[in-house]
Image (cartoon, rainbow, N blue to C red):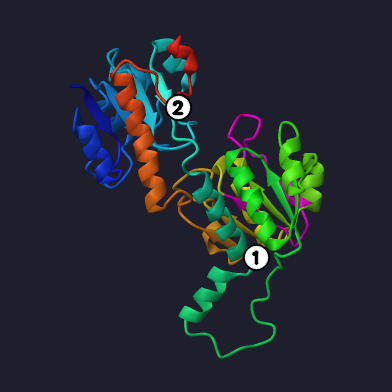
Amino acid sequence: MANVYITRMIPQEIIDSLRASHTVEVNPEDRALTREELLRQVRGRDAVITLLTDTIDGEALDAAGPQCRIFANYAVGFNNFDVAAATQRGVIMTNTPGVLDEATATHAWSLLLAAARRIPESERYLRAGLWRGWAPMDFLGQDVDHMTLGIAGLGRIGSQFARKAAAFDMKVIYTDVKPVPEFERQYGATFVDKATLLGEADFLSLHLALTPETRHYIGAAELAAMKPTAVLINAGRGPLVDEQALVAALRNKVIWSAGLDVFEDEPRLAAGLAELDNVVIVPHIASATFRTRLAMGKIAVDNVLSVLRGERPLTCVNPGVLK
């Protein structure tokens, strides 16, 4: 019977499925572990289920010990993993791709619509008792139908997001490492370079992986190149956007508004962001549906169980360690 640690509470039925065959301990606190707690709690474990808030580097891997066989992220992202360090030590690392694509894409649309039509701002106004009845110039927003939707990154989530644009009869432009002809034929999308994407998009949604090259993909220069009526959406990775540059751009009306699910230095926000009316901010909830979180947990646990049985995991992010 293996010893498994889970760094934060996930759905109970997922934990119970793992406890049926192994000893499982879960962080009892409803918060992320401190660095010191993480290093202490992984010690001696055979497997660890982690969150994006847990930095798993050489130090954490060594703290776990040579018997530890897998760190399984309860997330599609794995920028919290030092993949090279794990591979060097023969430790398998996994993630939970695929099952949260639809929920995340739909959530990005929620941010887009809320930002375009000033939903949170007008709701705060109403709740504060300030509304005095219908007025023709109150809370005018941006149209969505028939506008140009720009997408940075046409991977699994970006593709799901793009497909939903048909409901609004939008023109879709996108940029990625290379064109996707089949998607273009099916959905009428057009591959463009970054400069064209910035200049033509009425709505720009970010669905890129976080790499050294994509960090601050949107900064002051990019924001200045966008339309003053443009809306920026980020439900991908916080550091894709230079958050302080975005605050300045929103404050100075360089772009119309933004919708953010993720932030550059979570859980902290850039100074001044929370005070702005022309930004929709929510606390990293893109995958927060009952079905999605259960599916994420099932993949994480299946990965752990497979590795503990000596089998290949479903979604290994460092396949070199399996050779």
Name the residue type under label 2: Thr
Does residue 256 appear anywhere in the picture? no
Question: Which of 82 and 317 lies nearest the eye of the viewer?
Answer: 317
Percent x, y of residue 235:
55, 48
Percent x, y of residue 192:
80, 41
- Majority SS type along the magenta span: loop
Question: Which of 212 and 201 lies nearest the eye of the viewer?
Answer: 201
Name the residue type under label 1: Ala
What residue would you read off at disc 2? 315
User: Which callout, 1 or 2, points to the residue nearer the camera?
Assistant: 2
Percent x, y of residue 98:
50, 38
Residue 227, by quadrant, is bottom right
216 versus 232 height, above or below: above
* 119 to the left or right of 36: right
Q: Residue furthest top?
A: 323
What residue would you read off at disc 1? 116
Percent x, y of residue 252:
70, 61
Q: Which residues are magenta?
A: 208-234
Say how many tags the image has: 2
